[in-house]
Image (tube, grey):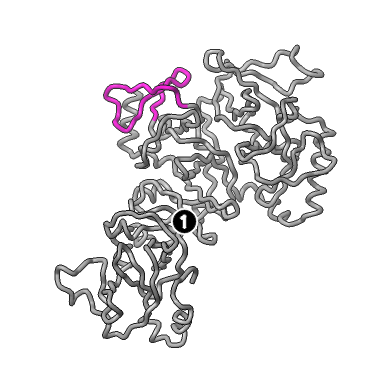
C-alpha cells in the first residue's frame, strides 16, 4: 500500500493467516479521534491527490482525481463527521476503500495497522443510546489508551452517496456513442460558422468545417533542421506527429517564442494535417451571410489572397478577416512539410499504429472551464460561442434562474450563469468569459462560462462512466474523459440535461 505509515512487517503478517486477516484493521485519526476500517476493502493509502470539483455533487465530495488511469472520487471525512475543515499537511492521507466502487476518504493521518481478537470488538448494539451513531458499527477495546471507533463505510456510502450504492451495470458502451457529429441545419443555411482567433491583436477566422480540432501549444516541439522557415517544429498529438506552422511568420509579423498561452488550430490540407499556431482562440461565430463580404480582387496577392472574406460585426466596428487555409501554402511548401514529417516518423516509429486510428473512435468536444475544473460538450450541440456583453438586461417577471437577456443578431437570447447553475461561487465578469449557446428543446439558451479552452478530439477509450454521486449529477455528467498523458479530467456534460422540463417551459413562455 502506498504511503502507509505502519511497519511493513505488520502488513505482511496478514497474508500468513486468513483468519488473522479477517480481524486486521487500519486505524486513522479525524479531528483528534481515532477510527478504524477493516483491512479487506482497503485498496491502498495515498497522499491526497489533486481533485477537480464536481458540480451538483454532495458538499463532502472534494472532487474527482486520476489514480493511475482510473477516476477516483475524493471524500472529506471531516465534512461527513461535521468537523471544521483544516489545511492538508504532510500527514494527511486518502484511504482508498472499494465496496463495489473505489472511493478515497481523506483522513488527518493514518496511525497503524492492528490485529484484534474477536472479543475485543464491542458491537454498536451494546453501546448506550448516547454513544451510538449510524456510521459507527462498533468499538475496539483494549487497543491502547484511545477508544477506537469502527466506521461502517458501507452505511456511510449508502447514506451519503445513494447513487453509488444503487449503481449497477456499465455505461461504457453508451459513452462511446458519437453525439457530436451532426449539426442542426434548421434555418442556418444563411449563416457562416467560423472559429475566430487573434494574431498580433488582429482578429482572423477560419470556417469551422476546415478545423479538425484546437489544442494548447505544447511545452516542447521536435526541431526540424533545414525545414521551411514558417515551420516551428513537430509536436506529438495523441501518438501522431503534427507539423506546427507559425501564422506570425506567414503574415510577416514580429517573431514570438512558442508559449503555453498559444493555441494550435489543426486543419487538413491536401491530406496533410497542419497545426496553425496563433496567439489565442477567441470564439465560435455564426455570422449572417449578408455580413460577410468577399475580399476585393485588388487586394489579392499574385492573383490569389490568403484572406477570402471580411466579416462586418458590431455594426462595422469589428472586422474579422476570414482565411482560406488551403491558400496559405504553395504545393511545394506543403510537400516539404510532409517530407519533414515523414522523416521524423521514420526516426521514431513509436505510436504510428495509434496514429492511424479512425475518427470514428474519437469524440470532438468543446472544452470550457469553471475555475480549475474542465468540462466538455459535443461540438455538434454548441450553436455558437459569443462574448459576454458589458451588461445583461434583466426582464421583469423572467424566470429566477435567468441571469438576463442579450440581443443576438436581432433575437432575444436568455442567458444563465453556469456557475450559479452548478452551485459554485460567483466571480467577477472578465473578458475571458464566454456565452455558450445551445438549442434546448427548440429554445436557444446561453450559459456563461469562465473561459473556452479548446476544441479537441478525445479517444473513446479515454472516456469512462462517471461516478454516480447524486441523482442530478448522474443525469448531467454521465461520463468523464480521463486524459492520462496530460493528467486532466474533463467532465462530459449532457447539454439536454442543463435545464429541467419546467424550466424549459418557462423559457419558452418567456420567448413567446
Q: Residue at x 41, y 49 (%)?
A: 54
Place of residue 510 in the rendered image (x, y in percent of width and height, measured from the top left): 32, 25
Q: Which residue is mark 1?
A: 171
| Vertical arrangement, residue 261 with respect to residue 342, above or below | above
Within 10 Å of disc 1 (Cα), the crowding (few <14, some 14-19, many 20+) is: few
Which of the two residues, 100 or 434, is positioned nearer the viewer here? 434
> What's the magenta bit mostly, secondary-structure-wise?
loop
Q: Secondary structure at mark 1?
A: loop
Residue stretch in magenta: 388-415
For the C terminus, the quadrant is top left
Q: What x and y, as percent, mark residue 308?
A: 69, 21
Answer above or below: position of 10 versus 324: below
Residue at image coords 76%, 56%: 349
Q: For this rendering, which residue is in front, 67 or 205?
A: 67
Residue at left offset 33%, top offset 62%: 157
Q: Nearer the viewer, residue 130 or 481?
A: 130
Please provide percent x and percent y for residue 177: 53, 49
Res 5 quadrant in image:
bottom left
Q: Does residue 207 belong to the magenta stretch? A: no
Horizontal relation, residue 175 to residue 341: left or right? left
Residue 24 in the image: above or below residue 181: below
Amino acid at each position: 500500500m502506498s504511503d502507509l505509515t505502519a511497519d511493513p512487517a505488520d502488513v505482511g503478517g496478514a497474508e500468513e493467516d486468513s483468519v488473522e486477516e479477517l480481524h486486521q484493521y487500519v486505524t486513522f485519526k479525524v479531528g483528534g479521534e481515532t477510527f478504524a476500517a477493516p483491512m479487506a476493502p482497503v485498496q491502498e493509502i495515498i497522499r491526497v491527490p489533486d481533485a477537480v470539483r464536481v458540480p451538483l455533487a454532495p458538499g463532502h465530495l472534494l472532487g474527482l482525481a486520476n489514480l493511475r488511469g482510473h477516476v477516483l472520487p475524493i471524500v472529506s471525512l471531516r465534512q461527513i463527521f461535521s468537523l471544521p475543515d483544516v489545511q492538508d499537511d504532510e500527514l494527511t492521507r486518502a484511504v482508498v476503500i472499494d465496496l463495489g466502487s473505489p472511493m478515497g476518504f481523506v483522513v488527518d493521518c493514518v496511525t497503524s495497522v492492528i490485529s484484534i481478537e474477536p472479543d475485543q470488538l464491542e458491537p454498536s448494539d451494546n453501546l448506550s443510546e448516547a454513544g451510538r451513531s449510524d456510521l459507527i458499527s462498533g468499538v475496539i477495546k483494549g487497543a491502547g489508551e484511545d477508544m477506537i471507533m469502527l466506521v461502517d463505510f458501507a452505511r456511510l456510502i449508502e447514506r451519503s452517496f445513494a447513487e453509488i450504492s444503487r449503481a449497477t451495470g456499465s455505461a461504457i458502451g453508451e459513452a462511446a456513442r458519437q453525439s457530436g457529429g451532426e449539426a442542426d441545419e434548421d434555418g442556418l443555411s444563411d449563416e457562416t460558422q467560423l472559429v475566430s482567433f487573434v494574431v498580433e491583436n488582429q482578429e482572423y477566422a477560419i470556417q469551422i468545417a476546415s478545423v479538425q480540432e484546437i489544442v494548447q501549444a505544447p511545452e516542447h516541439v521536435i526541431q526540424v533542421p533545414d525545414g521551411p522557415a514558417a515551420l516551428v517544429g513537430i509536436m506529438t498529438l495523441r501518438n501522431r506527429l503534427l507539423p506546427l506552422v507559425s501564422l506570425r511568420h506567414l503574415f510577416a509579423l514580429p517573431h514570438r517564442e512558442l508559449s503555453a498561452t498559444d493555441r494550435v488550430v489543426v486543419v487538413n490540407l491536401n491530406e496533410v494535417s497542419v497545426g496553425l499556431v496563433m496567439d489565442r482562440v477567441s470564439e465560435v461565430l455564426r455570422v449572417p451571410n449578408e455580413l460577410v463580404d468577399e475580399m476585393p480582387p485588388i487586394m489579392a496577392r499574385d492573383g490569389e489572397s490568403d484572406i477570402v472574406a471580411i466579416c462586418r460585426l458590431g455594426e462595422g466596428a469589428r472586422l474579422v478577416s476570414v482565411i482560406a487555409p488551403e491558400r496559405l501554402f504553395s504545393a511545394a511548401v506543403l510537400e516539404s512539410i510532409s517530407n519533414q514529417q515523414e522523416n521524423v516518423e521514420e526516426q521514431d516509429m513509436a505510436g504510428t499504429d495509434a496514429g492511424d486510428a479512425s475518427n470514428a473512435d474519437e469524440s470532438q468536444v468543446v472544452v470550457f472551464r469553471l475555475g480549475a475544473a474542465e468540462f466538455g460538450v459535443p461540438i455538434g450541440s454548441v450553436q455558437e460561442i459569443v462574448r459576454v456583453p458589458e451588461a445583461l438586461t434583466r426582464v421583469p417577471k423572467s424566470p429566477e434562474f435567468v441571469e438576463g437577456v442579450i440581443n443576438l443578431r436581432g433575437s432575444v437570447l436568455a442567458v444563465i450563469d453556469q456557475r450559479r447553475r452548478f452551485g459554485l461561487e460567483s466571480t467577477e465578469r472578465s473578458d475571458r468569459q464566454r456565452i455558450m449557446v445551445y438549442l434546448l428543446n427548440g429554445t436557444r439558451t446561453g450559459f456563461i462560462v469562465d473561459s473556452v479552452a479548446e476544441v479537441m478530439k478525445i479517444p473513446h477509450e479515454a472516456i469512462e462512466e462517471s461516478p454516480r454521486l447524486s441523482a442530478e449529477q448522474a443525469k448531467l455528467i454521465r461520463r468523464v474523459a480521463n486524459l492520462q498523458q496530460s493528467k486532466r479530467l474533463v467532465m462530459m456534460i449532457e447539454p439536454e440535461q442543463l435545464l429541467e422540463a419546467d424550466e424549459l417551459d418557462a423559457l419558452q413562455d418567456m420567448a413567446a
